[in-house]
Amino acid sequence: MSLLLGLEFVAVAVSAIYGILLAARQGMDFVGVFAVACVASFGGGTLRDLFLDRTPLFWVANLHYVVVVFVLTLASGFILRLLPRIRPLLPLPDAIGMALFTIVGTQLALDEGTN
C-alpha cells in the first residue's frame, strides 16, 4: 500500500468518525448517522476527483472505504453510549481529517500537473 493510499484511508476513517459524532449529537438513527458519515468521508474527495477529472471516484474505485464507514457506524452504536458528552470530541477528528485530505489532495493535484 502506498503512503498516499494509507493517508487517504486514515482520512476517510477519521472523517467518518467526525460525521458519526456530529450525527449522534443530533440524535439521528443508524441510517442518518451512516449518511452523515458518508458525506463527511467522501464529499471533499469526490469534489477533488471531479475537479481533477479523475474517474472512477476514489470511493467507487476502492469500495472498502464504504465498508469501513459502515463498520465504524455499526461500532459507534455501542461506543457512543459510553460517552456522556460528544461536543468536546468534535474538533479533533475534523482537524485531522481535513489535514490528511489536504495532503492527499495536494499530491494528487501535483501528480495531475495542475498548479
Image (cartoon, rainbow, N blue to C red):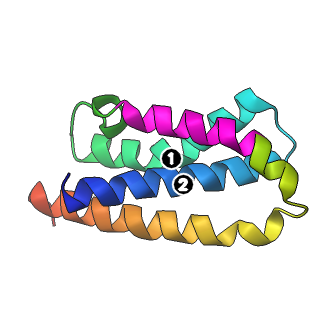
Q: Could you tell whether 28 is left or right of 90 in the image?
A: right
Q: Residue at x 67, y 41 (%)?
A: 75
Q: Is residue 75 above or below residue 90?
A: above
Q: Which residue is mark 2?
A: 15
Is the stretch drawn in magenta largely helix, strand or loop?
Answer: helix
| Range shown magenta | 63-77
Q: Is residue 60 magenta?
A: no
**Which amino acid lies under the numbered mark 1 shown in the image of this protein?**
Ser
Say what secondary structure mark 1 lies in.
helix
Report whether residue 107 is seen.
yes
CB-based contact (under 8 Å), mark 2 and mark 1 = yes
**Mark 2 and mark 1: span between their CA atoms?**
5 Å
Q: Could you tell whether 96 is left or right of 103 in the image?
A: right
How far from the left and from the top, in percent, is residue 55?
Answer: 22, 33
Q: Quadrant of residue 39?
A: top right
**Which amino acid lies under the numbered mark 2 shown in the image of this protein?**
Ser
Report whether residue 25 is seen.
no
For the residue carrying disc 1, how many other residues have a C-alpha within 10 Å: few (<14), some (14-19), or many (20+)?
Answer: many
Q: Could you tell whether 31 is left or right of 56 in the image?
A: right
Question: In this view, which residue lies farthest toward the right?
Answer: 84
